[in-house]
């Protein structure tokens, strides 16, 4: 058997890697495709497959590059990636190592904006039920914005003209760049814990989506939602919408509009007070006229012209009442007298004295009436009650013959 050049698998993979790494075109390549099997590992690395209609390639994006992305990649998303092609020696697999990624046909910032908007909407930060009402007559207004921009000058001018009674307190903050969101958040926290303001305005003038990106911060959105004081978001122009606009208690299309929404117009208030003054004077005058008419009506009544007329009238009423009362009492007395006479006659008919008056007598013994001869013995003492007195008698003989009857043997 002839001597052969035999190498190990690791040597082979290393050799292939060296060949691919030596190709300059493969060290910096832009590739368009669709993401699939996307995994954002807890380590921060991103693993995915990039494919088109006929082929695919395994790809990886390490944490350092992944943290710079403005959006969260997802399976099914069409992207353009930049990176280098190399070999993963352990598995003998060539893959694309990505260091940058942009959405294909749609800006990364736009995708990041839509993703964060949907996330915060699902978290309830946009719900109308959690938004606070603005005070009608604020005494202090806190403004978080750049101290040198045109926005603060416009707001101060409008607030001073519309409602000079309100005190304006400015918290200077960055409104553009990566360092802007923390300074805006500190301004919100300052007005919530320090100055006793009634309403807070945050915002800046117009610009590109990159210029306004500080107001699309997730941390800023939660700071606005946590504020105890109502917040007006005034970012950019009327057509510009940021995440801060959706979370704030009120969105103003421009900083100038925010100043108008924050306070009432003193000129309108003055006109309103003048209208109220006229209405009150008219109402008071009408009330006086009504009372004067009522007083004239009272003055024309007979009781006011001749007070004794009412006295005489009440006297007549009293005389009539007394006569009616006397007649009623007489009628009632006569009726009671008749009832009493009837009761006395009935009682008299049943009285023992009536019986005595007709010639009868009542024998008593020991204080009790004697109704039968069997209750007596010869020699017993008996008291006989008559109509005009009594007589003490002694029994000499008993006869049990009934009155009108015959003697019993």
Image: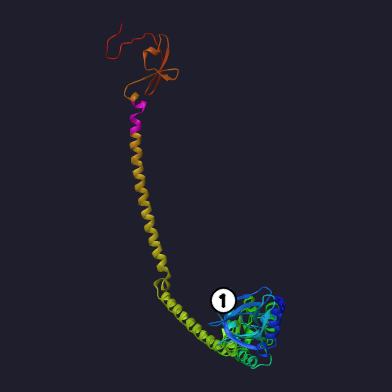
Span highlighted in magenta in the image = 346-354
Q: Is residue 348 magenta?
A: yes
Magenta span main SS: helix
Model colouring: rainbow
Residue 203, quarter of the rendered image: bottom right
Q: Which residue is mark 1?
A: 121
Quadrant of residue 15 in the image?
A: bottom right
**Observer-nearest residue: 169 or 63?**
63
Asked if residue 92 is among those painted magenta in the image, a careful observer would answer no
Q: Residue at x 36, y 45 (%)?
A: 333
**Residue toward you, 207 or 382:** 207
| Left-right relation of 399 to 87 | left
Q: Is residue 179 visible?
A: no
Q: Position of residue 369 (x, y in %)?
A: 40, 19
Question: Residue 38, position in %: x, y?
Answer: 60, 76
Specify the farthest residue to the top.
409
Q: Secondary structure at mark 1?
A: helix
For mark 1, does the 10 Å Cα neighbourhood hold few (<14), some (14 to 19), or many (20 or more) residues? some
How many badges with numbers are in the image? 1
Kindly indicate the quadrant of the structure image that contains residue 46.
bottom right
Residue shown at the point (33%, 24%) measured from the top left: 355
Where's residue 263, x and y in %?
59, 85
x then y, percent, for residue 234: 60, 86
Classify residue 207 as left or right of residue 276: right
Q: Quadrant of the N terminus?
A: bottom right
Placement of 267 over or under 376, stated as above or below:
below
Location of residue 28 with respect to 314 vertically, above or below: below
Q: Quadrant of the C terminus?
A: top left
* Left or right side of 268 for 353: left
Q: Is residue 33 visible?
A: yes
């Amino acid at each position: 058997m002839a001597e052969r050049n035999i190498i190990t698998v690791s040597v082979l993979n290393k050799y292939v890697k060296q060949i691919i790494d030596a190709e300059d075109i493969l060290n910096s390549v832009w590739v368009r495709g669709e993401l699939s099997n996307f995994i954002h590992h807890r380590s921060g690395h991103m693993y995915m497959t990039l494919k088109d209609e006929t082929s695919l390639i395994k790809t990886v994006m390490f944490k350092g590059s992944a943290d710079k992305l403005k959006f969260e990649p997802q399976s099914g998303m069409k992207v353009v990636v930049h990176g280098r092609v190399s070999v993963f020696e352990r598995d003998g697999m060539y893959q694309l190592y990505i260091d940058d990624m942009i959405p294909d046909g749609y800006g990364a910032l736009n995708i990041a904006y839509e993703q964060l908007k949907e996330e915060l909407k699902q978290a309830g930060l946009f719900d109308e039920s959690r938004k606070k009402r603005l005070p009608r007559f604020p005494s202090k207004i806190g403004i978080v914005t750049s101290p040198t921009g045109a926005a603060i000058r416009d707001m101060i001018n409008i607030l001073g003209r519309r409602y000079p009674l309100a005190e304006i307190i400015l918290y200077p903050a960055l409104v553009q760049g990566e360092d802007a969101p923390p300074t805006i958040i500190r301004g919100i926290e300052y007005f919530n814990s320090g100055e006793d303001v009634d309403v807070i305005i945050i915002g800046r003038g117009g610009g590109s989506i990159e210029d306004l990106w500080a107001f699309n911060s997730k941390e800023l959105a939660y700071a606005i939602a946590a504020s105890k004081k109502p917040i007006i978001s005034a970012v950019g122009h009327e057509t510009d919408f940021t995440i801060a606009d959706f979370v704030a208690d009120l969105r103003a299309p421009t900083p100038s509009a925010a100043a108008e929404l924050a306070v009432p117009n003193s000129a309108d208030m003055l006109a309103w007070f003048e209208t109220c003054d006229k209405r009150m004077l008219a109402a008071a005058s009408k009330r006086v006229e009504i009372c004067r008419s009522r007083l004239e009506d009272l003055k024309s009544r007979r009781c006011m012209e001749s007070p004794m007329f009412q006295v005489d009238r009440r006297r007549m009423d009293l005389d009539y009442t007394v006569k009616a009362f006397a007649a009623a009492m007489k009628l009632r007395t006569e009726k009671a007298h008749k009832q009493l006479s009837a009761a006395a006659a009935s009682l008299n008919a049943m009285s023992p004295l009536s019986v005595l008056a007709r010639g009868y007598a009542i024998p008593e013994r020991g204080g009790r009436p004697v109704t039968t001869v069997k209750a007596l013995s010869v020699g017993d003492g008996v008291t006989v009650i008559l109509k005009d007195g009594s007589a003490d008698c002694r029994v000499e003989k008993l006869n049990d013959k009934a009155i009108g009857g015959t003697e019993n043997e």
